[in-house]
Amino acid sequence: MQKIDLKKHQQRLDRITEIFAGMVTHADEQAASRCPYRDRFDQCTAKFRCGNQQEAAGDDGLPQCGHDGSFDYRPAWETDPQVYDKAKAKLEQIRSHASRRRPS
């Protein structure tokens, strides 16, 4: 059996790490504004009702994703807007309380 050149092996691992690091960075950036249920054809693949779904354009029956990337898409999934508003207010209260407790 041929011996493994450890230096070349490490170079290959470093190259793979570099490739995946770029992919992860791009995915993190996209996740901040692109709905994770929107496919490459701009169809909504969510298995639940989303407020951004639009009438299906194709024969496959999948609704179009109406999310344009300019807003936080997560509230569209909330079926009770009052629950979302209450949770948002509670988070703000926690942040405010925590900032007051921090030393200056």
Image: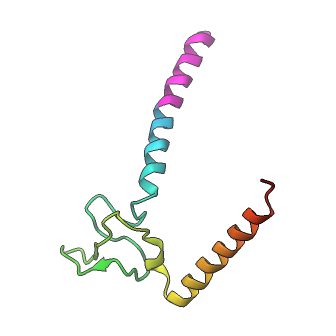
Q: Which residue sits furthest front?
A: 104
* Figure check: 54 above or below 31: below
Residue 1 visible (yes or no): no
- Quadrant in the rendering for residue 49: bottom left
Residue 63 visible (yes or no): yes
Residue at 40% from the left image edge and 65% from the top image edge:
35
* Figure check: 91 above or below 83: above
What residue span does the magenta drawing correspond to?
3-18
User: How many numbered circles are shown?
Assistant: 0
**Residue 8 placed where, x, y %?**
55, 12
> Depth check: 103 or 60 in front?
103
**Residue 51 placed where, x, y %?**
37, 81
**Residue 31 placed where, x, y %?**
45, 56
Residue at 46% from the left image edge and 36% from the top image edge:
22
Looking at the image, what colour scheme do you see? Answer: rainbow
> Depth check: 89 or 6 in front?
89
> Depth check: 6 or 3 in front?
6
**Which image quarter is the N terminus in?**
top right
- Quadrant in the rendering for residue 67: bottom left
Judged by its main secondary structure, the magenta piece is helix
**Residue 56 placed where, x, y %?**
23, 78
Q: Is residue 15 magenta?
A: yes
Q: Is residue 38 magenta?
A: no
Residue at 25% from the left image edge and 78% from the top image edge:
61
* Figure check: 76 above or below 100: below
